[in-house]
Amino acid sequence: MENNNKKTLEKVNIICSKGTLEDVYAALVMANGAVMEGIEANLFFTFFGLEGIHKKHMNNLHTSTAGNPALRMPGGGRMPTLLGGLPGVEGTVSAMMRKQMEALDIPPVDEFLEMITAGGGRVFACKLAMDMFKLKKEDLWEGVEDILTIGQFYELCDGDSTQIIFI
C-alpha cells in the first residue's frame, strides 16, 4: 500500500566538524546534491571543519592516514595502520586522492563552494570555533555568509521537512 502522506525533504543543514579531505568533500557533495535537487542547503563549518572554508588551507586538505582502517593501497589491499603514521605517507595519499578526484572532474573546494552558493546554498562558520581558533571572517572564503552561534544555526533548521546531517 502506497503512503500518499509522505513529505518531501525541503531543507538540509549540514554540519562539517572535521577538516580532512574526505569529510569536507562529503559535506560539499551532499550540499551540492541537495541544491541540484532543489532542496535548500545550509553548510555550517565548525571546529576542524573550518579548514574547509579557511582561505589558506581549503584547497590543500589532507586525507587522514593514521588510524584509518578503511585506507587501501593502490593494489586494493588495506594499508597497515602503522604505515599511515610514517613521514610523507599522509602527503602522498592526499596527493593521490586529489589526483583521483581531478580525474573524475571533482572541483577544488573553493570552486565546489562557488557552485553550491551559485545554486542557492548558504555557507556559515561557527562562532565558538572561530573564537577558539582565533580566526576572523577575513581568514575565511569570501562566500561565507555569516558567523553564527549554535542557536542561530538552529534557527535555520526550522520546518517539518528539514534534516540536520552531522559529518
Image: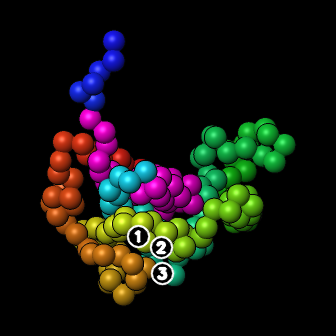
Q: Which residue is mark 2?
A: 114
Look at 40% across and 83% down and name the residue there.
142
- Please provide percent x and percent y for residue 51: 46, 70
Marks 2,3: beta carbons within 8 A: no
Q: Vertically, is 90 above or below 51? A: above
Query: Is residue 13 located in the magenta-colored stretch of the structure?
Result: yes
Q: Are marks 3 and 1 in contact (CB under 8 Å)?
A: no
| Residue 68 magenta-highlighted | no
Instruction: Pick whichever of labels 3 and 1 is earlier in the sequence.
Output: 3
For the residues labelled 2 and 3, the Cα–Cα distance comes to 13 Å
Residue that carries the numbered disc 1 in the rendered image: 117
Can you say whether 58 is above or below 66 in the image? below
Amino acid found under the numbered disc labelled 1: Thr
Give the residue displayed 20% in from the left and 58% down from the top. Answer: 156
Categorize mark 2 by other alpha carbons within 10 Å: few (<14), some (14-19), many (20+): some
The one nearer the camera, 91 or 120, is 120
The answer, for residue 106, to whether it is visible in the render is yes
Question: Which image quadrant is residue 130 in?
Answer: bottom left
Q: Position of residue 19 (x, y in %)?
A: 48, 62
CB contact under 8 Å: marks 1 and 2: yes
Q: What kind of residue is marked 2?
A: Glu
Side of 58 where 155 appears, left or right: left
* Label 1 – label 2 distance at C-alpha: 5 Å
Label 1 crowd (10 A; few <14 / some 14-19 / many >=20): many
Callout 2: helix, strand or loop?
helix
Q: Which residues are magenta?
A: 7-36
Question: The N terminus is located in which quarter?
Answer: top left
| Number of numbered markers | 3
